[in-house]
């Protein structure tokens, strides 16, 4: 079965419209998100445009804050600190990657954990590691939501995550662990990736390598979630899995595009809404 991330994301957006309307009734304002972009990275500009569009479509007010490429670390820290002090802001997002001369960890630390809607700050990653409530990174959160809405229960399953980045692989493995799966995390130094993958009931590919995951690495009936976003030899968008062949063995599989991708922004919007509701309480 092909998991339709686009349809699930559309459903979540519809649910959010109801939630933001209810919030407006109670608070007299819309949930709000500030998006800070430093520099002029073209990919970041597209991501930001999509996030702002998503906000408008779900009743979230967004503030687009731009700083030049040569912004100093001190200026960036002050800009985030200023946003953090704005009482009418529920979420703050600093678009990554930052220009090379800036220390992302230091700048992200200025976002109060309850407004860190990307879930990238040390405080929120720490909360996740401790199994405590906090803001969770949108892409892995989106994967968990897809599993939930398709009735795929991680408890007692063997989950294998390929990738250990701070924004996908690591939070993904912690979420699965917190959901009572037995988790193996693979990375570029993993000795026998195929052997590890063959043991997976739930296989999450987040390496960013086209055709890394081939059918001979997948157990019959496994659930395959493909987070990878790559370009194939013809420049076409593709994931980490050899979709045509892997789908013949998987019980469920996400396509690229149309799988995990649409869930990421939907989860960001959901995090903003949740942050606003919690602050109102
Ligand atoms: P990243 O920071 O480059 O991390 C990639 C991870 O994969 C690293 O941990 C790396 O291991 C591991 N890896 C690379 N090649 C491998 C191999 N041959 N075998 C085993 N492990 C390997 O990337 P990321 O930010 O996590 O993103 C991963 C992918 O997801 C990318 O394609 C990205 O575009 C995509 N993505 C999609 C969304 C979405 O919304 N759909 C959101 C975020 C990211 P080491 O740690 O040892 O280097």
Image (cartoon, rainbow, N blue to C red):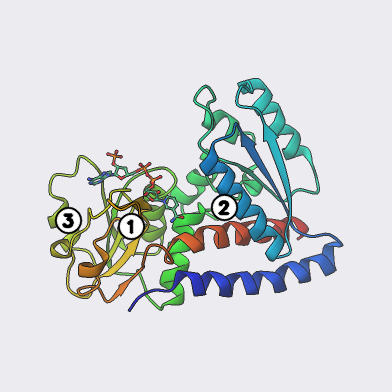
Q: Is residue 246 visible?
A: yes
**Pointer 2: what residue?**
135
Cα separation, mark 3 vs mark 2, equals 30 Å
Q: Ligand 1 within 8 A of label 1's CB?
A: yes
Q: Which residue was labeled with disc 3?
A: 196
Query: Residue 130 location, x and y as percent?
Result: 46, 49
As drawn, is 167 to the left or to the right of 112?
A: left
128 vs 2: above or below: above
Q: Residues within 10 Å of mark 3 (few under 14, many from 20)?
A: many
Q: Residue at x 56, y 28 (%)?
A: 106
Q: Position of residue 133 (x, y in %)?
A: 55, 55
- Answer few, some or many: residues within 10 Å of disc 1's Cα (few below 14, many 20 plus, some between 14 and 19): many
- Name the one closer to the observer, 95 or 137: 95
Q: CA distance from mark 1 to mark 2?
A: 26 Å
Asked where in the image residue 29 lies, by quadrant, the reply is bottom right
Q: Is residue 184 left or right of residue 281?
A: left
Q: Earlier in the sequence, mark 1 or mark 2?
A: 2
Helix, strand or loop under label 3: helix
Is label 3's Cβ within 8 Å of ligand 1? no
């Amino acid at each position: 079965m092909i998991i339709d991330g686009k349809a699930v994301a559309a459903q979540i957006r519809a649910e959010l419209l109801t939630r933001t309307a209810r919030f407006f009734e109670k608070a007299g304002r819309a949930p709000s998100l500030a998006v800070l972009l430093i520099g002029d990275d073209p990919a970041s500009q597209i991501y930001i445009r999509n996030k702002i569009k998503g906000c408008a479509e779900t009743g979230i007010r967004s503030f687009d804050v731009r700083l030049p490429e040569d912004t100093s670390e001190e200026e960036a820290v002050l800009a985030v600190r200023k946003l953090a002090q704005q009482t009418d802001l529920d979420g703050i997002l600093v678009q990554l990657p930052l220009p090379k001369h800036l220390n992302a960890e230091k700048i992200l630390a200025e976002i109060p954990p309850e407004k860190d809607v990307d879930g990238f700050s040390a405080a929120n990653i720490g909360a996740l590691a401790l199994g405590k409530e906090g803001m969770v990174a949108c892409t892995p959160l989106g994967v968990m939501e897809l599993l939930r809405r398709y009735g795929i229960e991680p408890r007692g399953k063997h989950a294998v995550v390929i990738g250990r980045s701070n924004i996908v692989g690591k939070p993904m493995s912690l979420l699965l662990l917190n959901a009572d799966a037995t988790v193996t995390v693979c990375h570029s130094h993993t000795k026998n990736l195929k052997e590890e993958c063959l043991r997976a009931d739930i296989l999450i590919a987040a390496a960013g390598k086209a055709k890394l995951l081939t059918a001979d690495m997948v157990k019959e009936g496994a659930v395959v979630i493909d987070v990878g976003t790559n370009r194939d030899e013809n420049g076409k968008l593709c994931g980490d899995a050899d979709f045509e062949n892997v789908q013949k063995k998987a019980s469920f599989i996400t396509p690229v595009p149309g799988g995990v991708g649409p869930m990421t922004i939907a989860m960001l919007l959901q995090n903003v809404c949740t942050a606003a509701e919690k602050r109102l309480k």
